[in-house]
Image (spheres, rainbow, N blue to C red):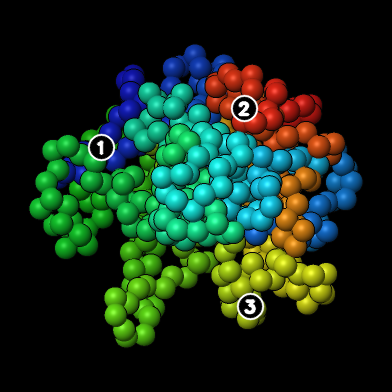
Amino acid sequence: MKNIRLSRRTLLRGLGALMALPVLEQMEPRVARAAEPGSAPRRLAVFYVPCGLYMPNFTPRGSGRGWTLSPTLQPLAPVKDDVLVLSGLSHEPGRPDEFGHHAAGTGAFLSCVKVVKTDRQDGVRAGVSMDQVAAKALRPHTRLPSLELGNDGGDGTGSCDANFSCAYARNISWAGPTSPRAKETNPQAVFDRLFAGFDPDATRAQIERRKAYEQSILDFVSEDARALKQRLGARDQRKLDEYFTSVRELELRVAALDQQAPTCSKGPRPERTEDVREKTKVMCDLMVLAFQCDLTRVATFMLGNARSDRVYDFLGLTSGHHTYSHHQNNAENHAALAKIDRWELEQFSYLLQRMKSVQEGEATLLDNALVYFGSEVADGNSHGHTDMPVVLAGRGGGAVTPGRHVRYGGQPIANLFISMLDSVGVDVSRFGDDGTGPLSQLKE
């Protein structure tokens, strides 16, 4: 090992581009590398799916370590030992007084604060979401406090569900009662935000020149990278090569999205249509890369907006998701929901496997993170807010013992969020409308 010490914020620079590096051995204190496997950064991630899930197919049999994957959870088989399924948790702040369960549940999804019913933009009132509480505390450690991603766009104007503002239906991340953190739905823009365009010395001409010549960000930092590699030990050199390879592959995939997405028929202001399968995976890859190079430690992803009626034709379905979710105990609707729910869990499993593939010392990125999977309601037909579909993945650096199914008796999800915040060093005793303390049984 070369006798040098690298800053955790070491960057590669070239022709107006900056690239953050993954966590290398020579960025960590030598004592910590040898004696403290838990010294890597802690991360929080959220994976939201709309319209609830068909709970009979979701809830596993057995509890503790003697549980079996349900039909919907089968895609989690490769990471079964890395997940906790938490049954019996409630989310009462997401319950509206009458109608509008999807928007109300999504608006309170991460804040556990009952939203004010309004379709006026100036009347919106929500709570600060769990991810933003973490982002505020972790802000000094990373360039980006948080990353908000999603597949579906739309602003916060108008009514999206029973006179509830679209701001509630289209955002899960809230910096304040009137301040939703709008998600980015363009993978190219996310990529540029993470890996380019943030050099204060870069000019617009330099950025455009890179795009015009279709050059990789790596091309701009290659000379800097070669000089750095000469100063690294063999293990760090291999890790740097793997990281650059993953960035290069993602660049190609992001660029391919622009070329492969079919366009709508001719008409006024035609819009692009996007393949949700490829786009979801690219967004997951972007989250992993953002964590890997410690650009942020907090990220959220919305697979779809609340009450999404996306038609999953590639699953052989002809009606929309929200339509099927009102299944009326119809067997055909149950079968359709089973296909959609399983596909959603496949995407979640993809994210977890990507995180597990990133080595951080003796642990993995997934070991050092907690990833929350959930929806705004339980069963979409009854719009339930008790016994919510909840999966918690990762170990949070030792805060959680996964590989189990834990049953609760109605404890609030807000208590889970208190525990998740504690895993990244944020100490809160209460959270939201009904959070009273850390959730029990997360660690054996």
Which amino acid type corresponds to the residue marked 3 in the rendered image?
Ser
Q: Which residue is mark 2?
A: 431
Q: The C terminus is located in which quarter?
A: top right
How many residues crowd mark 2 within 10 Å: few (<14), some (14–19), many (20+)? many
Task: Please tell me how many numbered marks the rendered image carries.
Answer: 3
Q: Are marks 1 and 2 in contact (CB under 8 Å)?
A: no
Q: Is residue 93 above or below residue 210?
A: above
Q: In x, y percent, where is residue 212?
A: 16, 63
| Figure quadrant of residue 437 | top right
First in sequence: mark 1 vs mark 3: 1
| Figure quadrant of residue 438 | top right
**Is 185 placed left or right of 381 in the picture?**
left
Q: Which residue is mark 3?
A: 319
Residue drawn 49% across the image and 53% down it = 119
Q: In x, y percent, where is residue 277?
A: 52, 66
| Figure quadrant of residue 234 | top left
Q: In x, y percent, where is residue 89?
A: 76, 40
How many residues crowd mark 1 within 10 Å: few (<14), some (14–19), many (20+)? some
Q: In x, y percent, where is residue 61?
A: 88, 50
Residue drawn 78% across the image and 77% down it = 332
Element class at badge 2: loop
Q: In this view of the protein, which residue sits in the foreground, 253 or 314?
A: 314
Q: Is residue 197 above or below residue 340?
A: above
Which amino acid type corresponds to the residue marked 2 in the rendered image?
Phe
Residue drawn 82% across the image and 74% down it = 331
For the residues labelled 1 and 3, the Cα–Cα distance comes to 49 Å
